[in-house]
Amino acid sequence: MSGNPLDHGVSESVHDAGLAARLPAELSIVVPTFNESRNVPLLVEALRNALGDTRWEVVFVDDNSPDGTADRARALALEDPRVRVVHRFDRRGLASACVEGILATASPYVAVMDGDMQHDEKILLAMLARIRRGDVDLVVGSRYVEGGGMGDWNKRRIAMSQIATALANKLTKTAISDPMSGFFMLTREAFMGSLPGLSSVGFKILLDIAASSPTPMRVAEVPFTFRTRQHGESKLDGLVLWEYLELLLDKTFGHVIPIRFVSFALVGGSGVVVHFLVLTIVLQVLLAMFGTTAETRWFAIAQGVATLVATSSNFFLNNILTYSDQRLKGASLWWGWLTFNIVCGVGLFANVGIARWLYQRHNYLVLSALAGIAVTTVWNYSMSSIFTWRKRR
Ligand code: GDD
Ligand code: MN
């Protein structure tokens, strides 16, 4: 053996914290952050205390938090080479942040944990010891196994979490008692196996990874108690439920149709309801005000208003749900609205044209109409993904 410190086997600790800090990491801890500037220094300090002479690094993946979390993390990185930052711009999303963070590391073991001090860093060593044994691919920090706990969660959130868990276990066929956990460690090999199948939507990255594994993952669990947040606030909102549904759908049908398209089509369906609602109301009001003498004209006006309202409602819903990861804001929101209307306007012509052509040939009313709608939905979807929610290059 040469004296080169790099010759140390991957699973060995170096009994000198100063040296360990300068060696390649055995464990990379990926921490997604959004507005956690006050927590980031606390977490780094906690990791230092908890991990001792383990060769670790922490990678903060920040989505350009307005509170300057990335700056805070960079300042820490200048003091300690074990701290690194991936700063993403114009992006949002917990799952994709974790994936990109993991991909920015090289160590054989990676952990994902929240940046708000709610996850107990003291179990990291136990998790590492467990995974080093080599007979499991994944170690989950679990709130549900003996010794774990929910902290101060309210009843409603506990119930929701349990329902989601039951659903998840059906889907992944892996028995993880806490598949919603955002605190886990896995081997790079296992992660690479799941990578091609990942959906990367929403909050549930562990579930995504476990469900995307080509072979069922071998799992161990280490209990911990969720801590109460001291600084900042939770980013989990009503959208999380929708994103969770999206993830389940994608894991079930994603290999057949892209989940964005499903979301787009569902929003389109809601647009039909909006359309008829507005049409009826406007028509009734016009008829009540001006009488039935010019009924066709009132109908045309009501139809026009309904179309505009339904298209706008589709646009805003898609912006919130279908494209939650690249939501348009400010001026681009209005520009997006305009391009969406143009795209849908053209789509409408295509719809009528195709439906008419089919109807002339075969006389099947419903089939012709449905074919028109299908073609328009595909058109609207692909064109709006190019012109309205185009990815910045
Ligand atoms: N980069 C990035 N981008 N980070 C984000 C984003 C985002 O869009 N949204 C949230 N985060 C970060 C937060 O800053 C925090 O470090 C972590 O992700 C978890 O977010 P919280 O807002 O604190 O979530 P929570 O405490 O309500 O939920 C946690 O517990 C759940 C139950 O175990 C998360 O870990 C969930 O994943 C988990 O399911
Ligand atoms: Mn939290």
Image (cartoon, rainbow, N blue to C red):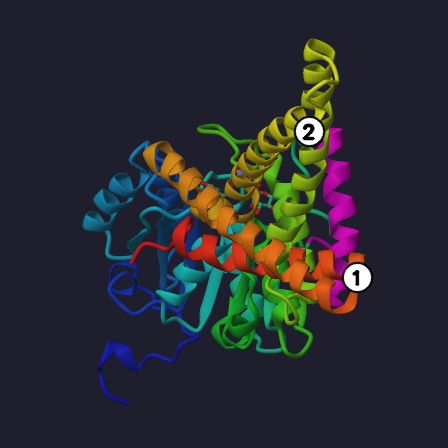
Position of residue 153 measured from the top left corner of the image (x, y, whole percent): 67, 32
Amino acid beneath label 2 = Thr
Reading the image, the residue beneath label 1 is: 170
Q: Which residue is mark 2?
A: 296
Q: Pointer 2: residues within 10 angstroms few (<14), some, or many (20+)?
A: few
Where residue 194 appears, x then y in whole percent?
A: 56, 72
The answer to whether residue 341 is above or below residue 16 is: above
Residue at the front extreme?
Answer: 293
The one of 76 and 266 positioned closer to us in this rendering: 266
Q: Quadrant of residue 211?
A: bottom right
- Between 203 and 386, the one lying in front of the other is 386
Q: Residue at x 32, y 54 (%)?
A: 392
199 or 268: nearer the eye?
Answer: 268
Image: 240 above or below 353: above
Q: Which residues are magenta?
A: 154-178
Please name the amino acid that badge 1 sits on. Answer: Lys
SS for dot 2 = helix
